[in-house]
Amino acid sequence: MVHLTHSVVALRRSIRKFIIDNLVTVEGLKVFFDFSYSTPDEDKWVVVVTDEIDIDFLASTHIVLYLFTKNDISGDKLASLRDTVYDYFLDLDITDGKARMPLYDEDWDVAEHIVMSIVRESGKERGETGTFYRWIQVRLNWGAK
């Protein structure tokens, strides 16, 4: 059996749980884990895309959060959505300012913590369907045994 720190399944489940617990349950946002071919019937939503995992002594991957709004010419709703999402990936109460995400085992017990770093983000863009969007790229790092 593959070690937890090398498990793609454990990582994807942990990312989903972190996003659902915070952005869906706490913030009430609509979140998708892949791109939909139709625009949702929402004023704002988030699409989360996970990159491939690079497993070495220090494992890493990236997630990209695409933030979307409708009827937002001024960009105020998009800016507010960005601030809401961004806050979950920072922790200014600790020295390095990087938030931690739990890595769960198959019993949903916390086995490790993943360090999250915001790498970069885009500015406001206009989508083809009259939506506005921006993206935030986050690097995830954890010790792989």
Image (cartoon, rainbow, N blue to C red):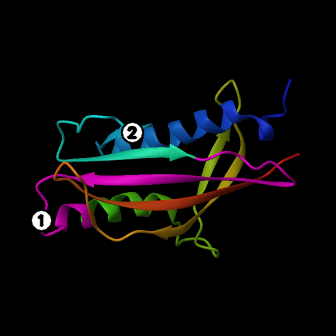
Above or below 80: residue 44: above
Instruction: Name the side, left or right, on which 90 lies relative to 70.
Output: right
**Is there CB contact under 8 Å for labels 2 and 1?**
no
Above or below 6: residue 71: below
Magenta segment: does it hold 38? no
Above or below 36: residue 77: below
> Label 1 sits on what residue type?
Ile
- Give the residues in magenta: 51-79
The residue that mark 2 highlights is 35
The residue that mark 1 highlights is 73
Residue at position x 69%, y 50% from top?
Answer: 113
Magenta segment: does it hold 52? yes
Quadrant where the N terminus sits is: top right
Instruction: Name the side, left or right, on which 108 lies relative to 88.
Output: right
Using the image as rendered, state which of residue 1 and residue 28 is in the foreground.
1
Q: Secondary structure at mark 2?
A: loop
